[in-house]
Image (cartoon, grey):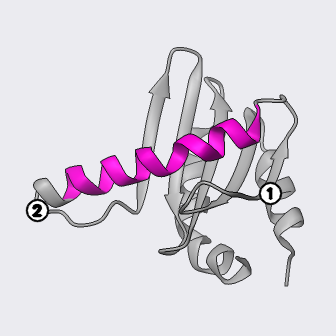
Amino acid sequence: MATLRELTEAIQNRRGVEAVVILGADGLLIETHDTAQNHAEALAARVPAVATAASQLGDAAGSGTAAMAVLEFERGYGVVLRLSDQALLFVSATADVALADLLYDLRQHRSSMAALV
């Protein structure tokens, strides 16, 4: 079975991915691979608020807890993936990332990633 470090490196090796951050639901950094120096700790501190807001929106819409949130920014994307009640994954990517492929792989491998945390 792969390690957390191998997991973050495998995701980061995709064209367009700048940072991969695995964090606790409390915002504490668990593991990161951040070649662009995007300040993983600052990202980890902010991701839980996004995950909470997305889940509140899902609840209000009658859709339930958010499993994944995709954010489009001026120069790229951010993906928040709920691995479990205790862990989240954040991926920062440039505008030229193969977004559909990335999202598909994250969904397909969510349970195996969650088992590593």
Residue ID for mark 2: 62
Secondary structure, mark 1, is: helix
Q: Judge the density around disc 2: few (<14), some (14-19), many (≥20) Cα neighbours within 10 Å.
A: few
Q: CA distance from mark 2 to mark 1?
A: 33 Å
Is residue 77 at least partly visible in the picture? yes
Q: Is any atom of residue 91 visible in this view?
A: no
Within the magenta stretch, is there residue 66? no
Q: Is residue 64 left or right of residue 35?
A: left
Residue under label 1, please give it.
8
Residue at 73% x, 42% y: name it.
41
Q: Earlier in the sequence, mark 2 or mark 1?
A: 1
Q: Residues within 10 Å of mark 1 (few under 14, many from 20)?
A: many
What predominant SS class does the magenta segment belong to?
helix
Quadrant where the image shows the C terminus: bottom right
Query: Residue 81 appears at what percent x and percent y?
Result: 52, 58
Q: How many marks?
A: 2
In the rendered image, the vertical position of residue 91 relative to residue 59, given as above or below = above
Name the residue located 32 percent from the left edge and 47 percent from the top edge: 53
| Displayed quadrant of residue 114 | bottom right
Q: Quadrant of residue 109?
A: bottom right
Could you tell me the amino acid type at mark 2? Gly
Q: Which of the pair 74/32 is nearer the observer?
A: 32
Q: Describe the element under mark 2 as helix, strand or loop.
A: loop
Task: Please state which of residues 28 and 58 is positioned toward the viewer in this rendering.
Answer: 28
Per the rendered image, the range of residues in magenta is 39-58
Q: Residue at x 53, y 46 (%)?
A: 47
Instruction: Give residue 106's position: percent from left, percent from top.
Output: 59, 60
Q: Is residue 90 above or below residue 110?
A: above
- The residue at the far top in this view is 74
* Residue sitting at x 50%, y 22%: 73
